[in-house]
Amino acid sequence: MEQNFSYEQLVHFTRKVFSLMGCPDDHAILASNVLLAADARGIDSHGVARLSGYVRLWEAGRINPVPDIKIIHQTPSTATVDGDKGLGLVVAPFAMKVAIEKAALVGSGWVSVKNSNHFGIAGQHAMMALEQDMIGMAMTNASPLVAPTFATERMLGTNPIAVAIPADRQPPFVADFATTTAANGKLEILQRKEHEAPIGWVQDKDGHCSTDPNILKQGGALLPLGGDRDHGSHKGYCLGAIVDIFSAVLSGANYGPWAPPFVSFLPLPPNPVGEGLGHFFGAMRVDGFRPANEFKSHMDQWIERFRNTEAVDGKKVLIPGDPEREMEAIRMKEGIPLLAPVVKDLKELASKFKIDF
Amino acid sequence: MEQNFSYEQLVHFTRKVFSLMGCPDDHAILASNVLLAADARGIDSHGVARLSGYVRLWEAGRINPVPDIKIIHQTPSTATVDGDKGLGLVVAPFAMKVAIEKAALVGSGWVSVKNSNHFGIAGQHAMMALEQDMIGMAMTNASPLVAPTFATERMLGTNPIAVAIPADRQPPFVADFATTTAANGKLEILQRKEHEAPIGWVQDKDGHCSTDPNILKQGGALLPLGGDRDHGSHKGYCLGAIVDIFSAVLSGANYGPWAPPFVSFLPLPPNPVGEGLGHFFGAMRVDGFRPANEFKSHMDQWIERFRNTEAVDGKKVLIPGDPEREMEAIRMKEGIPLLAPVVKDLKELASKFKIDF
């Protein structure tokens, strides 16, 4: 059961909710644009479906609607930002802007962030660099749901990495992926459909292979990209670990199993090793390496050559970012389909804040 | 059939060979140290086993023993280096040094390299940053052997990524991995043992799943980390693509299917889009983000917590770099075992250059 809503309707509603949480106008506008980018691009797990989650974190005192976000340490090309418990949806664009400003001055900028929380889709922040002819990068740590290779304990989040690279005639290359075999959102889809999960997505509490999409509720874990040792799960574990260290050990946020959960009903892990969740952003001027027009014309050639790769019957080789861009074109025209539980959730929010939905 | 050789004996022999190729003394010393680091750390596919391959590339005029390696474009935190067809084993440390010097001045340094060739193990270059209390990164593109998701064509190399992160009391975190399910070296081991490859490592020329470790000789391909679409191979494809673009599109090297093969008997791809092979290096001062002692003490805590993760029976959770460091300790004491075909190869080199082995 799905119901269609226009982008405008949803972004307007989301903005109102953030305003009523006490966010200043510019924050409410920015946060709602970032959150809705997920719905527009087809990453339904990271959009308005999470709005009530942010509200509950605010009610639990874990989100500060009027944060004093600031640089607390820096060099010409690096900085650490304290998010002051602000919405990750606002803290992340602030930090990415710092990275871009540094890149404009010295060629590249790298910003680690502490004291933040969930920042929406990583790709949206990385893409901020594109209009400056820069390569953008964004990553974040997250609630521990993933067991490293050979582990029975959940130690890492799905820790996504996004890289956005500008081209000229061609649309940009935008990679944005969790460092696990499958993102948690995909597992939730299987739960709703009552389908089994493919082997290599999850394990049970003892570390045995499982195909039960509900296994995380029984102490199971998501698996790093690769799935098992024979298929390179140690590489997915490395990637998730690098994201964790860049986002949280560099900045002074909580890392590994100390990362705070997104859901407000779970308690914060005891004896925190830092403040809040961490992110990491980067921006590199392409003309820091070669003239921008040369770079972008070779990116066109790269994209065209890869798009024309010989493919198996009935399939084609995609360029990272293609599916999300196509989805965005459709949804901005035809609307965004929301599942019944999400609609119910938004109606409850409307009633809580005494506004229309 | 294996025979043991001391590190000193092999490094001395390798140095002589590079000298007799015409390399200046400092280049021959550096190149042999980098090459032997692979053997010492247990990455047998990237060490002296490849020495005759470098010699054949030199004989084919594809390696310049007296390169004029230089910076051709730069900003305070970025640079592009032209390797002048030098040994990648020499070009890479030059470029990594540029990254480290820039990081010392402005917090981070990022260097893209063109006109190079195979650079040994990525981890060795990334580790150069550690003694400066910097995080080091190294990546390279390589001969096209990998089919992107849904492709039947080989478009990318095994394109490794290495990240080295310093700690205090604990040894450093050193991740170094191909962006494929399995490195080509692992396939070669199965070929020698006449074992089947696990599902998800390779496909045949039509893109069908295969377990034949010899399938690459029949038009097959290695698969990106993840193996197939259901298990996240599009993420491995993204990673390999990012390495390709950072290494070769940023620098002006050959990218994708134009990357030159390591083996001299294969012709160079026609209509090159750049010069030689490409690499990418990065260095970030940890005190560009927070005081170094704070960072390193939290890295100790990260490493200790992950090393003590609850594990499946009989296994333990490893820290990236643990196995290679343990191997190095053993091999520096007990010697480096070489397979009979490698020993034969080195004896032939000795006879070609009229030196002892």
Image (cartoon, coloured by chain):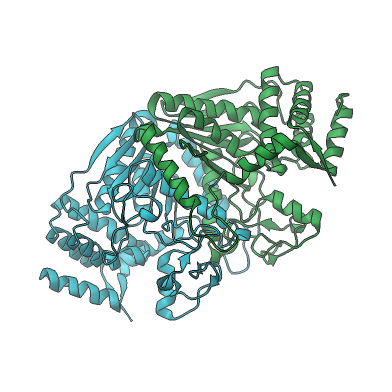
Chain colours: A cyan, B green
Q: Position of residue A229 (x, y in %)?
A: 60, 59
Is residue B66 in view?
yes
From the viewer's side, name the closer residue of A230 and B181. Answer: A230
What is the number of callouts on the image? 0
Is residue A130 in view?
no
From the viewer's side, name the closer residue of A205 and B72. Answer: A205
Indicate left or right for A276 with B206 as reference. left
From the viewer's side, name the closer residue of A69 and A137. Answer: A69
Residue farthest toward the top in the current orientation of the protein? B25
Indicate left or right for A95 with B226 as reference. left
Indicate left or right for A221 with B183 as reference. left
Q: Residue at point 78% right, 55% down?
A: B191
- Which image quarter holds the N terminus of chain A? bottom left
Q: Position of residue A87 (x, y in %)?
A: 24, 53
Q: Position of residue A357 (x, y in %)?
A: 17, 72
Residue farthest toward the left in the current orientation of the protein? A354
Q: Position of residue B228 (x, y in %)?
A: 58, 64
Q: Residue at point 85% right, 29% down?
A: B357
Quarter assignment of residue B231: bottom right
Indicate left or right for A279 with B100 as reference. left
Q: Residue at point 79% right, 22% down?
A: B20
